Image (cartoon, rainbow, N blue to C red):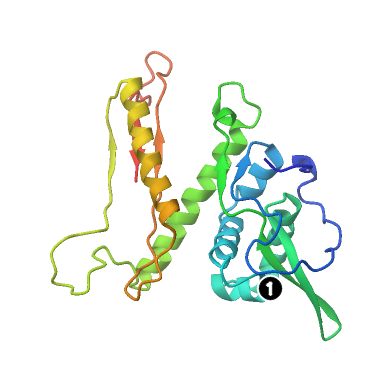
Amino acid sequence: MVENAESAENADEEPAAPGPATPGPGSGPGALKERRVEDAATLKALADPLRLAILDVLMAALASGPLTAKEIAAALDEPQTKLYRHIKQLEKAGLVRVAGTRLVSGIVESRYAPAQDSLRLAPEIFSPGSPTRAHAYGAILAAMDRVRGEFHARAMADRVDFTTSREASAPGLPGMFSHFTFRLTPDRMLRLRGRLDEILDELRAEGESDADDAVEATLFTLLYGVRPGPAGDSRTDTRPGTES
């Protein structure tokens, strides 16, 4: 959870000037291993594909150190001026911090780092009646847009590889696409969720590979149940949905 988070109504205001430089590469001292998100202000900051992309770049650079806005812009192939407002919103929500500053041609240049290594949405924000549920859905939709945009860009650049094999003719398809709906009991749904958690925990524990033939793998998983809708509503589907 973000401590001392600003209210959602003030999310677009300019934050205070950056503080003194913080030494050290990566997320640095005081950064959280995992941030549990449950407040509206943080969820609102996450509800934008570009801000999620900025976080992705900063988290990917944990080993090499903090980045300037210019370096983030180069990684995203976006105009630098387009990023400042989004970086400030992430900073104000406590998701990004200024990890160092230096004077360049009379202008203070900030270097940014993520304030956490990973993010997890608190399960209670999805409960019926939760005041932050709509904001949580906004963050999920932004993540879906982010994955779609990234996949499209990489596919158009002919960089998507569903084989990841040394030889194109080698058998096997490590990549996969699956989209289906299926009726499951609540117990079976819980077991499925547990198995998915085990796989993700295993990947986190292994860490990233530094092998010469390692490839960047993208995994996006969405698992949800659909409650029955009003009687006679033909648009209602009561089956659980799975995306992976």
Residue sitting at x 13%, y 64% = 171
Residue 147 at x, y percent in the picture: 45, 55
Residue sitting at x 79%, y 43% = 6
- In the picture shown, does residue 149 fall above or below 212? above
Residue placed most toward the observer, 70 or 214: 214
Dividing the picture into quadrants, the one containing residue 221 is top left
At mark 1, the secondary structure is strand
The residue tagged 1 is 68
Residue sitting at x 60%, y 47% = 47
Tell me the quadrant of the picture where the N terminus can be found: top right
Query: How many numbered discs sit on the rendered protein?
Result: 1
Q: Is residue 129 left or right of residue 219?
A: right
- In the picture shown, does residue 149 fall above or below 7? below
Q: Is residue 85 visible?
A: no
- In the picture shown, does residue 31 fall above or below 159? above
Residue 123 at x, y percent in the picture: 54, 31
Dividing the picture into quadrants, the one containing residue 139 is top right
Q: Is residue 107 visible?
A: yes
Q: Is residue 183 left or right of residue 52?
A: left
Dividing the picture into quadrants, the one containing residue 217 is bottom left
Disc 1 residue type? Thr
